[in-house]
């Protein structure tokens, strides 16, 4: 039986601004867009389509796959529907199955471990302690999440679509297999490698992470605002579509603190 998401005290200041159904409608929209685009792409005549359009289709579907995983990730924190936890976990499970036949229970447990021990050897998303480079870390990361059950399920679905539903295999490879793999790299790079890589000066926060500051539109395109990673660890129950707002509010508070410090310094300067 799935447990409720861990409640973090630091989430409270932002939770009241979340509409009770916004998470559900956003999740349904992402699942629907992914499904419709996948169906349309399965019917594309690859031989008669130019390479630029094919690449665009692959990249677009990759972005849709990333949306599925981000939605499942939000569900792990109860951010899809904090009012109906069963529906919340169902949507998370569905998204991970559609994404790549991943086990929601397994990922939920590992993700809690990640938040409890970020950037340590007890963190299932961290490197092995010896190989810090991108490729080695990615392979170590993927090894912890793939299973034979998943591979067998994907194989059965692939062959069913190819030989029973008569979907062209080139379409399956281009728009079903490839986007899922590219999405895993996108999620890893922007959601794990970039924010959790140890800076030269060492970690400065107990969450062993940092925010990769980008304009809001670019932050969305790279990984659904997951680059605002320090904000996510500070306020983990805030959904992806509010992380940009949290980032802006924190920046504003920091500016106000700086201005306050300047004013205090000026008032303490003795009059000549």
Image (cartoon, helix red, strand yellow):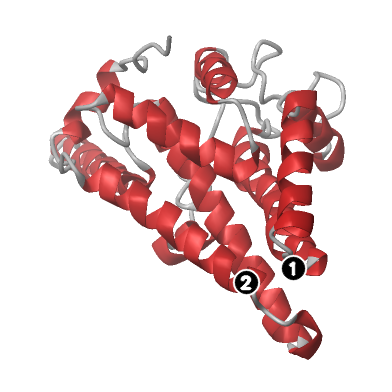
Disc 1 and disc 2 in contact, CB within 8 angstroms = yes
> Is 45 above or below relative to 253?
below
Residue corresponding to mark 2: 41
* Residue 211 visible: no
Image x and y of residue 1, in percent: 43, 9
Task: Specify whether 72 is left or right of 189.
Answer: left
Precedes in sequence: disc 1 or disc 2: 2
**Could you tell me which residue is drawn at 76 percent across and 65 percent down?**
174
Q: Nearer the viewer, residue 264 or 153?
A: 153
Image x and y of residue 47, in percent: 81, 85
Task: Specify whether 220 is left or right of 60.
Answer: left
Image x and y of residue 258, in percent: 28, 42
Disc sitting over residue 36 in the figure: none
Residue corresponding to mark 1: 171
**Could you tell me which residue is drawn at 86 percent across and 27 percent down?**
131
Task: Find numbered disc 2 in the image and state the secondary structure of the residue it sits on.
Answer: helix
């Amino acid at each position: 039986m799935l447990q409720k998401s861990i409640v973090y005290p630091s989430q409270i200041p932002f939770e009241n601004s979340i509409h009770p159904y916004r998470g559900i409608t956003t999740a349904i929209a992402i699942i629907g867009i992914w499904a419709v685009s996948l169906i349309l792409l399965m019917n594309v005549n690859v031989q008669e389509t130019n390479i630029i359009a094919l690449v665009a289709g692959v990249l677009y579907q990759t972005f849709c796959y990333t949306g599925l995983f981000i939605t499942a990730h939000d569900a792990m924190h109860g951010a899809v529907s904090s009012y109906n936890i069963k529906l919340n976990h169902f949507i998370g499970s569905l998204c991970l199955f559609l994404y790549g036949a991943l086990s929601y229970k397994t990922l939920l447990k590992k993700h809690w471990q990640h938040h409890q021990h970020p950037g340590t050897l007890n963190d299932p998303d961290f490197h092995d302690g010896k190989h810090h480079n991108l490729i080695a870390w990615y392979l170590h990361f993927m090894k912890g999440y793939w299973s034979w059950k998943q591979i067998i399920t994907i194989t059965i679905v692939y062959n069913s679509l190819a030989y029973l539903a008569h979907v062209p295999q080139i379409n399956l490879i281009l728009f079903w297999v490839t986007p899922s793999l590219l999405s895993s790299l996108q999620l890893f790079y922007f959601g794990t490698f970039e924010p959790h890589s140890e800076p030269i000066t060492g970690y400065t926060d107990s969450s062993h992470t940092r925010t990769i500051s980008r304009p809001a539109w670019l932050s969305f395109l790279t990984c659904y605002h997951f680059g605002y990673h320090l904000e996510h660890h500070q306020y983990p129950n805030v959904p992806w579509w509010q992380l940009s707002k949290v980032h802006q509010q924190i920046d504003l508070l920091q500016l106000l603190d700086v201005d306050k410090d300047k004013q205090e310094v000026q008032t303490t300067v003795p009059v000549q």
